[in-house]
Image (spheres, grey):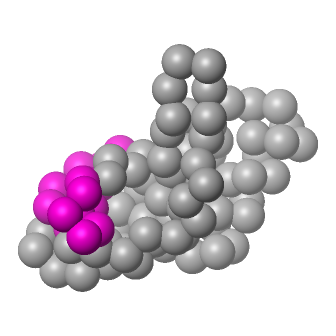
Amino acid sequence: MIGRLSGIVLEKRPDRALVDASGVGYELHVPLGTFAALPPVGERASLHVHTHVREDAILLFGFATPEEKALFERLITDAGIGPKLALAVL
């Protein structure tokens, strides 16, 4: 399981970021708060990661702070909502 990821920001959009970590590009779904906190493309970033494993996919969700990640995990566990809706809530 991936818990933290550091590398160079290759692309960033309001809902996703592509981060190169040692030659591997990781696509992370991010909330707007994290998108705003990301450095410009070409600079180094470090994100807290929640790895979400489904039957048909492995999804990575990136967060600027551990508190943001903890709230996301609480939402998808306690409230019984999915990860995409939890991102929208954040």
Which stretch is magenta?
9-25
Pinpoint residue 66: horizontal percent, then vertical percent.
64, 75
Residue 39 visible here: no
- Tell whether position 19 is magenta: yes
Q: Is residue 68 above or below residue 75?
A: below
* Residue 46 appearing in the image: yes
Q: Main secondary structure of the magenta part?
A: strand
Taking the view exactly as shown, the residue that stands out farthest to the right is 78
Q: Quadrant of residue 24?
A: bottom left
Name the residue at the left extreme: 42
Residue furthest toward the top? 56
Residue 64 as seen in the image, left or right of residue 8: right
Examine the rendered structure and indicate whether residue 18 appears above or below residue 65.
above
Give whichever of 23, 89 is nearer the camera.
23
Q: In the image shown, does 55 or 70 lie closer to the viewer?
A: 55
Q: Residue at x 74, y 52 (%)?
A: 73
